[in-house]
Image (tube, rainbow, N blue to C red):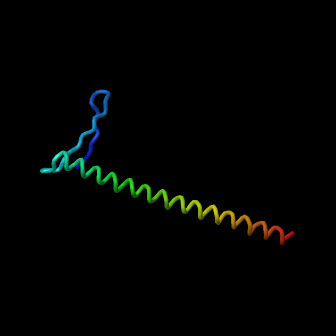
């Protein structure tokens, strides 16, 4: 299945090319299933990114404390 965008006059037109023997309903079901998979992957990656951001923030806080300790001991 392929989705193409063409221009007709001033307007963009999207077209779906179905594989031989695939009905419109089958294509729609396949696209909806793929959308669910992609949406779940996006949600998982966002969750992973939030966890990484939290870890980096924690490490930055720890580094700031280390630097403060070094400054206090150096002066």
Image point 29% across, 54% down: which residue?
33
Q: Residue furthest right?
A: 75
Determine whether 45 is above or below 69 in the image.
above
* Residue 19 horizontal side relative to residue 9, left or right: left
* Residue at x 83%, y 72% (from the top left corner): 73
Image point (63%, 61%), residue name: 57
Whole-percent x, y for residue 37 in the image? 34, 56
Vertical placement of residue 49 versus 29, above or below: below
Q: How many marks?
A: 0
Image quarter (top left, top right, bottom left or bottom right) of the C terminus: bottom right
Q: What percent of the width, then of the height, locates residue 44?
A: 44, 59
22 left or right, relative to 62: left
Residue 5 in picture, x, y percent from top left: 29, 39
Q: Residue furthest left?
A: 21
Q: Residue furthest top?
A: 9
| Residue at (39, 56) in percent of width and height | 40
Horizontal side of 45 relative to 8 (left or right) equals right
User: Is 18 located above or below residue 54 in the figure?
Assistant: above
Location of residue 24 by image quarter: top left
Q: Is residue 52 above or below residue 4?
A: below
- State the residue in front, 10 or 18: 18
Q: Quadrant of residue 64?
A: bottom right
């Amino acid at each position: 299945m392929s989705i193409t965008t063409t221009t007709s006059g001033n307007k963009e037109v999207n077209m779906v090319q179905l594989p031989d023997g695939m009905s419109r309903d089958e294509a729609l079901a396949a696209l909806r299933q793929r959308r669910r998979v992609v949406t779940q992957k996006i949600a998982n990656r966002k969750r992973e990114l939030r966890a990484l951001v939290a870890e980096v923030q924690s490490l930055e806080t720890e580094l700031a404390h280390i630097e403060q300790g070094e400054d206090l001991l150096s002066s």
